[in-house]
Image (cartoon, rainbow, N blue to C red):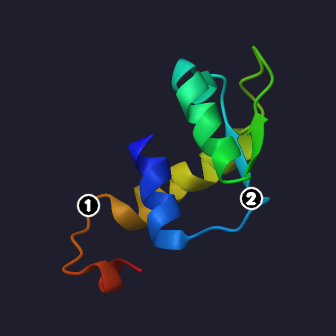
Amino acid sequence: MIRLNMAILTRAPEAGLMFHSDQGSQYASELYQTNISKHDFICSMSRKGNCWDNAVAESFFGTLKKELIHHRCYKTRQEAR
């Protein structure tokens, strides 16, 4: 929940934001769901037992990390951006 709260504080997303996750216990917990509802976000979860829902996004970000992020040191956050 710390990352969600950090994102809310730093990005100030508007109501109606779609929050997509898997059905892990952290995301399905009452506390997490209450926090999502409190900010009027729309909760979207992968279907149970369907690991392919996020395959395209996972592949893209995996490639991005391997090619641009790993094995490189950024001096500042701005440089990384």
**Tag 2–tag 1 contact (CB < 8 Å):** no
Instruction: Between residue 72 and residue 24, name the one nearer to us.
Output: 24
Q: Which amino acid does label 2 sit on?
A: Leu
Residue 38 spot, x, y in % from top left: 65, 47
Residue drawn at (45%, 40%), measured in percent from left and top? Answer: 1
Residue drawn at (60%, 24%), measured in percent from left and top? Answer: 30
Picture quarter containing residue 15?
Answer: bottom right
Say which residue label 1 marks.
Answer: 71
Q: The C terminus appears in which quarter of the rendering?
A: bottom left
Picture quarter containing residue 45?
Answer: top right
Q: What element carries label 1?
A: loop
Residue drawn at (52%, 25%), measured in percent from left and top? Answer: 26
Q: What element carries label 2?
A: loop
Instruction: Between residue 38 and residue 49, name the one nearer to us.
Output: 38
Compared to residue 76, the image places residue 54 above or below, namely: above
Say which residue label 2 marks.
Answer: 17
Furthest residue in direction bottom, as rendered: 78
Q: Earlier in the sequence, mark 2 or mark 1?
A: 2
